[in-house]
């Protein structure tokens, strides 16, 4: 039996420099890998980011479309929201309790990629 282990979102951006600033400095992900076919140029670039075991791949190669949406479960959504506010994250939505049992908020990078962070606040199944 083959079992799937994990899925890693691939987020397309226009600028690897702007993306690295946003995902590292603003959202607190560490850039753990990057590859460029021409190291003398900023783009295109493929980067891997990690925070607390959550991995995001970010690419400025033109083989996809801008405007992805990623959902990340966290253990303290309000503390994470406060962290992002303290770092001046733009396009930061307020944290709200949802009828399906999560408390969540979203951010958007300069390429309209949406990253939502949520915490399960009830053990009842979604309706």
Image (cartoon, rainbow, N blue to C red):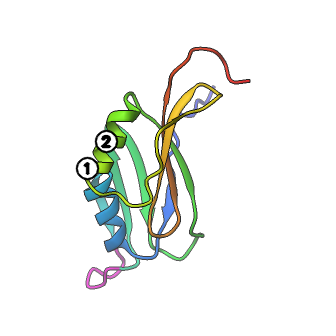
**Is 48 placed left or right of 40 in the picture?**
right
Q: Are marks 1 and 2 in contact (CB under 8 Å)?
A: yes
Which span is picked out in magenta?
36-42
Q: Position of residue 89 (x, y in %)?
A: 34, 57
Mark on residue 86?
1
**Residue 78 on the magenta segment:** no
**Residue at image point 29% right, 65% down:** 21
Quadrant (top left, top right, bottom left, bottom right) of the C terminus: top right
Residue that badge 2 annotates: 82
Q: How many marks?
A: 2
Name the image quarter holding residue 36: bottom left
122 or 54: which is nearer to us? 122
Q: Position of residue 78 (x, y in %)?
A: 37, 34
Q: Residue shown at 66%/18% (left/top)? A: 125
Disc 1 on helix, strand or loop?
Answer: helix
Q: Quadrant of the N terminus?
A: top right
Q: Residues within 10 Å of mark 2 (few under 14, many from 20)?
A: few
Q: CA distance from mark 1 to mark 2?
A: 6 Å
Q: Quadrant of residue 52?
A: top left
Q: Is residue 21 above or below residue 30?
A: below
**Residue sitting nearer the eye, 28 or 46:** 28
């Amino acid at each position: 039996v083959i079992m799937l282990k994990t899925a890693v979102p691939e987020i397309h951006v226009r600028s690897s420099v702007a993306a690295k600033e946003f995902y590292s400095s603003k959202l607190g992900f560490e850039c753990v890998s990057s590859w460029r076919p021409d190291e003398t140029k900023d783009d295109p670039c493929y980067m891997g980011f990690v925070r607390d075991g959550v991995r995001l791949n970010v690419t400025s190669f033109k083989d996809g479309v801008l405007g992805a949406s990623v959902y990340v479960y966290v253990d303290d959504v309000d503390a994470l929201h406060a962290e992002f506010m303290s770092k001046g994250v733009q396009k930061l939505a307020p944290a709200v309790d949802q009828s399906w049992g999560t408390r969540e908020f979203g951010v958007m990078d300069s390429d309209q990629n949406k990253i939502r962070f949520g915490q399960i606040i009830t053990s009842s199944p979604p309706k």
